[in-house]
Amino acid sequence: MDERENRIFSFKKEKSETITEEGRWEIFTPISIIILSVMSVVFIHSAQVYTGGNKWEMQAVWVLCGIIIYVIVSFVDYHFWMRFAHISYVIGIASLFLVFIWPERYGAQRWIDLHFFKIQPSEFAKIVTLILGASILSRSEIGDLRESLKGILKLAFCFFCPMFLIFMQPDLGSTLVFPPIAFSILYVARIPNRFFIAISILFVVMVGVLSYDVFRYYQYKSENPYPTEATVAYEDTSLIPLKDYQRKRILTFVAPEVMDPNGIGANWNRIQALIAVATGGISGKGLGNGMQAKLGYLPSAVAHNDFIFAVLAEESGFIGGMIAITAFMFLIFGCLKVASKSNDQFGAMLAVGVSVLFMTHIFINIGMTLGITPITGLPLPFLSYGGSFIISCFILLGLVQSVYRHRKEFR
């Protein structure tokens, strides 16, 4: 084993001989997966029971396929993916280019339409980017900030490519998932604190610039309340690469009483979701009895995916909501437990990166249902409908399970 390989597999190796024999399966994540998957099928069916939709049947199929893939991935030594990290990354980036061949759907180009089903490459781009990022840092020389700079720059390029392509689709929600993953694996790599301080300052500056841009957009909308064909869109004059509808979402979140005082425009879904959660009470109204989805106040186009937690909270109440949140907590705890038991940095980075990815999805999705985060269209792991997303979740947790299963094996 050369010096580089020795550095890769030396993380916590000194503790391997003292670890007592444990089960080959980390049980928290599989139990959480089963609970959330069952709840997903049940509440997707409930959300569509009065519209005649069959999304719950497809969700059940995706879950069964996902379980098979989860088991297969967990049995494969996670170092295998490290060896092919660059190849899988190139394939992932190529798939992000392919989406621009297909026509727009709902104002975006995010899917590859294969007629029988649609694939959303951004979900799988998250996986290959995490794998390559963890591979890069585990192989890089990490010391003071200057010594670590080469690895940081490589990681920045690794994450920038998919972020840029996903942002151009446009898919702001999925784009926002990448930075937390990158910073989490940088933390595991023990990058000096000065780097995180500098990034925090840069983040504050960027928020300030974005806030000013959104404020200018508000002024523009006030001056042009009834745009005509001759009116130039604000997005064509701004240096910030955001679409006007994205600025409108931010303004609706920050000042809903200004952008949509009657609650019949961009603020509609947020209000209906809040009503659903608030009227659920302790035990809920019962399956199929949720009035918001039943009467169409919570639109059928979003009730089974982006706002599935609102349906769950209305029909199963505080108890059902807490069961789902507790399952998510155990899922994240399981990932962090695996990271703490990993024998190398690569495995620890994978497990921590997956936990942060799920935390980001969970916080933003439930937050937008409760009105504490902007509406971004980011799905809720295992609960929201979606084939590509469900399969990607199973693959990610299969990788974490693989880290646990192969934690004592060294090459």
Image (cartoon, rainbow, N blue to C red):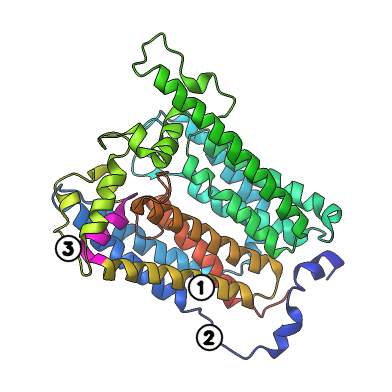
Could you tell me the amino acid type at mark 2? Gly
**Badge 3 or badge 2: first in the primary sequence:** 2
x then y, percent, for residue 263 = 26, 37
- How far apart are the two marked residues, 3 and 2, measured between alpha carbons? 37 Å
Q: Secondary structure at mark 2?
A: loop
Could you tell me the amino acid type at mark 1? Phe
Q: Which residue is mark 3?
A: 287
116 over 358 or under it: above or below: above
Q: Nearer the viewer, residue 68 or 378?
A: 378
Residues at marks 1 and 3 touching, judged by CB atoms closer than 8 Å: no
Q: Secondary structure at mark 3?
A: loop
Looking at the image, the residue that sits furthest to the top is 230
Residue 314 within the magenta-colored segment of the rendering? yes
Q: Which residue is mark 1?
A: 333
- Looking at the image, residue 99 sits to the left or right of residue 92; the answer is left
- Residue 170 in view: yes
Disc 3 crowd rating (10 Å Cα; few below 14, some 14-19, many 20+) is some
153 over 35 or under it: above or below: above
**Badge 2 or badge 1: first in the primary sequence:** 2
x then y, percent, for residue 190 = 74, 64
Marking on residue 23: 2
Q: Nearer the viewer, residue 259 or 146?
A: 259
Disc 2 crowd rating (10 Å Cα; few below 14, some 14-19, many 20+) is few
Task: Give the foreground label among 2 and 1.
Answer: 1
Q: Which residues are magenta?
A: 305-317
x then y, percent, for residue 398 = 51, 67
Residue 403 occupies quadrant = bottom right
Please report the residue visible at 51 percent of the width from the left and 73 percent of the height from the top: 333
Quadrant containing the N terminus in the rendered view: bottom right
Q: Nearer the viewer, residue 328 or 37?
A: 328
Could you tell me the amino acid type at mark 3? Leu
